[in-house]
Amino acid sequence: MQENENIRDALLASLGHDLRTPLAAITGAVTTLQRGETDLRPDQRTELLDTIGQEAARLNRFVGNLLEMSRIDQGVVKVRRDWVDVGDAIRLAAERARKTHPGRQTRVSLAPDLGFVRGDQDLLSQVIFNLLDNAHKYGESEVSVHARNEGDQVAISVTDDGPGVKPADLERIFEKFFRAGGTDRRKPGTGLGLSICRGLVRAMGGTIKAESPAIRRRGTRLIVRLPLAELPQDEEAR
């Protein structure tokens, strides 16, 4: 019981820190704008407004991840069984990642014969975005996403060029609130993104794993595999 209490307190402290950080940045920027309304240069005002927008979006992602994790834990995530174009889901996620991380490279490579899966396009796109968002946080310059058919599965991989993940942590990074690297490399976030990915991928009948190093003894590659689904003839004809 005491151990559970200690874990709960540690998690609450971690979340409190991560949620207060964007709030403090937003409050500081707003206060500066209010007090320096006539003294600020146009470029300074623009920079402060950009800060408010970026931190508000970051806060929104934090809260969204918390709510999504709560739904997964309670078993109330409703996964549709539609025909999902994997390429479309990836392109949507990549475009969102480019807007979230302006100035960072997000490269997309899709096999020409990429198949369909049965599932929920919105949830699959959210999974890929979470992987890209995580890769941009820990990568140093470029993130790539590749997708191809592998036997009776579609394999989607997201690779970064960061310092990589220790072998002992390759499974732990999918645990709730776990973040690799220690306090000296603490990154903004709730530590829920990859845990949410695992929950959603499993709900769609797939698997997710991490490999590190990924490229030139660096980086991490996260691989999602989902069962291929053949389109019925009436869908192919459309």
Image (cartoon, helix red, strand yellow):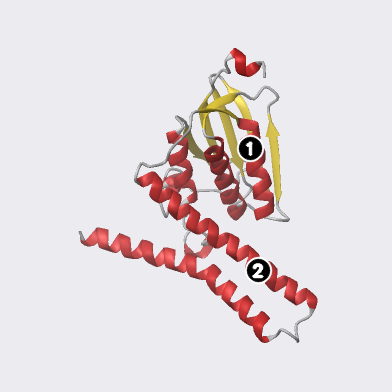
Q: Residue at x 78, y 74 (%)?
A: 43
Q: Earlier in the sequence, mark 1 or mark 2?
A: 2
Q: Could one spot residue 216 in this view of the protein?
A: no
Residue 170 in the image: x percent, y percent? 46, 44
| Frontmost residue, 145 versus 45 | 45
The quadrant the C terminus occupies is top right
Kind of residue indicated by mark 2: Thr
* Circle 2 residue: 51
Q: Residue at x 46, y 52 (%)?
A: 192
Q: Could you tell whether 25 is left or right of 142 in the image? A: left
Residue 73 in the image: x percent, y percent? 36, 46
* Circle 1 residue: 90
Q: Is residue 151 above or below residue 105?
A: above
Residue 71 in the image: x percent, y percent? 40, 47
Kind of residue indicated by mark 1: Ile
Helix, strand or loop for disc 1? helix
Q: Residue at x 57, y 60 (%)?
A: 58
Q: Could one spot residue 122 in this view of the protein?
A: yes
Q: Residue at x 70, y 34 (%)?
A: 109
Q: Is residue 154 above or below residue 162?
A: above
Residue at the left extreme of this rendering: 1
Q: Residues within 10 Å of mark 1 (few under 14, many from 20)?
A: many
Q: Residues within 10 Å of mark 2 (few under 14, many from 20)?
A: some
Q: Could you tell whether 174 is left or right of 33 in the image? A: left
Residue 95 in the image: x percent, y percent? 68, 45
Helix, strand or loop for disc 2? helix
Query: Could you tell me how many numbered marks the image carries?
Result: 2
